Amino acid sequence: MKHHVCAVILAAGKASRMGKMKQLLPLGHQTILEHVIDKTLNEEFSAVYVVVGYNEALIREQIKRRDERLHWIINPAYEDGQSTSLKVAFEQLKARYDHMVLFLGDMPCIQSKTINYIYEESIKKAINDEEPFILRPTCNGINGHPVFIGNFFHDVFMQVEGDSGLRQIINQLSNCFTREVNDVGVMLDVDTIEQYEQMKEFYENRYKKA
């Protein structure tokens, strides 16, 4: 049985704590969001969807990546929290795909081997389980991304509100699993200028070692 899996990148927020559009901040020779998009396009997802809201026209203009698998979803209700981005993605995609791998648009440092591992572990589970489930990586016991959302066509995924939508889903599901990985990138996001500076240093050190 072939499993149809899409990647969804959440990048609709205003980044109010940051004070500037973190999606378009430079990291090396690309923006933060471009790094995330490239990581997903380098994998064998059926398609990649980027959910945008705040300044969506500017983001789409600035992102130069062109690929037939790359699509944009506009969330006009982005100010009502992250759950609105989840809902619009679920509504538009649940009839076309079995599973979704959820990425955040400000987490560009996840390693490809981690994405592959979470994908493979989740497909193993999906082969024998038609119930909705979630599988995500942990690093040093801390939950991270990307999050594999299995059988997401079930209505339970529409019952989310506010800015903690994923957490609400996890609290409702009995089938939630984690896999420990050796990849601190699963935890590194950007909410403040200080975190951005730390991410740049982390990225530069990794690039130099590579």
Image: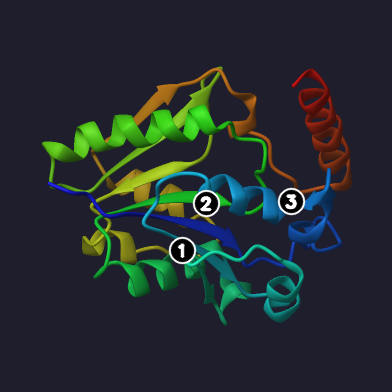
Q: Which quadrant of the view contains residue 87?
A: bottom left
**Rendered position, 128 above or below 36:** above
Q: Which residue is mark 2?
A: 41
Q: Nearer the viewer, mark 2 or mark 3?
A: 2
For marks 3 and 1, give the CA distance: 19 Å
Mark found first going from the N terminus, 1 or 2: 2
Q: Nearer the viewer, mark 3 or mark 1?
A: 1
The crowd level at tag 2 (other Cα within 10 Å; few <14, some 14-19, many 20+) is some
Under circle 2, the secondary element is helix
Q: Nearer the viewer, residue 39 or 149?
A: 39
Q: Nearer the viewer, residue 129 or 38?
A: 38
Q: Residue at x 78, y 18 (%)?
A: 209
Q: Residue at x 26, y 54 (%)?
A: 4
Q: Residue at x 57, y 45 (%)?
A: 39
Direction from residue 80 to residue 132 in the image, left or right? left
Q: Residue at x 24, y 70 (%)?
A: 95
Residue 32: mark in rendering = 3
Mark 2 residue type: Leu
Circles 1 and 2: CB atoms closer than 8 Å: yes
Q: Which residue is mark 1?
A: 69
Direction from residue 155 to residue 145 in the image, left or right? right
Mark 1 residue type: Arg
Direction from residue 117 to residue 3 in the image, left or right? left
Mark found first going from the N terminus, 2 or 3: 3
For marks 1 and 2, give the CA distance: 8 Å
**Rendered position, 9 above or below 62:** above
For marks 2 and 3, give the CA distance: 15 Å
Under circle 1, the secondary element is loop
Q: Position of residue 54 (x, y in %)?
A: 69, 75
Mark found first going from the N terminus, 3 or 1: 3
Mark 3 residue type: Ile
Q: Position of residue 172 (x, y in %)?
A: 29, 48
